[in-house]
Image (cartoon, rainbow, N blue to C red):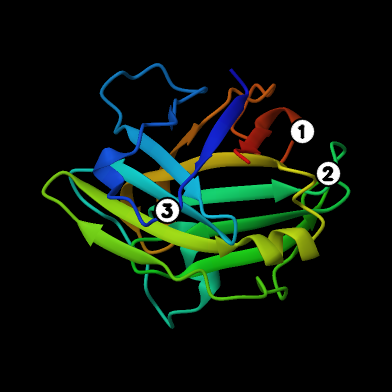
Amino acid sequence: MNTLLISRRSDKPEWTSLPLLCELHYPWDEDSTLAKTHFKAYHTGEDLHFQFTAYADKLHIYRKVNDKLEVRFSERVELFFREDADLRNYYCLEMDPALRVLDYQAKHYREFNRDWQWPESLNLVCRSQADAYLLSGRISIKTLTALKLLKGNVLEAGIYRGHVLSLQGEDADIRWSSWLKPDAVKPDFHIPSSFGKWVLEE
């Protein structure tokens, strides 16, 4: 199923009370022992709230000068939002457990403007458990509308994770998981088939 219904809440619910919207899968790896990832979200009419539960025995986070580009070599979860089906304009948020955000604007195919910045604070929070990290954030509906991403009550988005199994310097052994199975032989999220629809409940 390539559509998620994002429920509307008037209050601030406990994440544990919200339904699981999707579990990410490994389209390019059949290893059933790889770490799972769960995704939840809701909206208030003013803000979109999301949470990843990313299971991992150990977190590998690359740090050198603490630049946002270091997220490329780190354990992370990701949200992409597209303006149009041809990916002539889309935006990417790659978020690691250290609360660093690799935010950039992109065009098909893989034309990245990494100097671009998401126009607001995402208000990220990360909480660690024994076997997982829970990364939560908030995006304003106003920003999604201004970027021409929210059309009526529909967003077109992708949900991903880069799970780092080992890290030596910038050499990261990453396994890629996704909400949907992209139409690609090798790992690639920067194609139209990796995106689905989020319908925000009115």
Q: Is residue 39 left or right of residue 190?
A: left
* Quarter occupied by the C terminus: top right
First in sequence: mark 1 or mark 2? 2
Of the residues shown, which amino acid type is indicated by label 2?
Leu
Estimate the spatial distance between the alpha carbons at disc 1 and disc 2, rounded to whole Å.
7 Å
Element at badge 2? loop
Query: Can you identify the residue that label 3 sits on?
Result: 76
Q: Are marks 1 and 2 in contact (CB under 8 Å)?
A: yes
Of the residues shown, which amino acid type is indicated by label 1?
Pro
Of the residues shown, which amino acid type is indicated by label 3?
Arg
Element at badge 3? strand
Q: Position of residue 166 (x, y in %)?
A: 30, 48
> Would residue 76 be seen by someone viewing this image from the given angle?
yes
Kindly identify the residue that appears in the image at 34 percent across and 38 percent down. Answer: 18
- Counting other residues with Cα less than 10 Å from the Cα at mark 1, is it few (<14), some (14-19), or many (20 or more)? some
Which circle marks residue 192 in the picture? 1
Kindly identify the residue that appears in the image at 54 percent across and 75 percent down. Answer: 121
First in sequence: mark 2 or mark 3? 3
Kindly identify the residue that appears in the image at 15 percent across and 51 percent down. Answer: 129
Location of residue 174 with respect to 63 vertically, above or below: above
Q: Position of residue 73 (x, y in %)?
A: 45, 58
Q: Position of residue 113 (x, y in %)?
A: 76, 67
In this view of the protein, which residue sits in the foreground, 190 or 202?
Answer: 202
| Furthest-bottom residue in this view | 65
Query: Can you identify the residue that label 2 sits on?
Result: 87
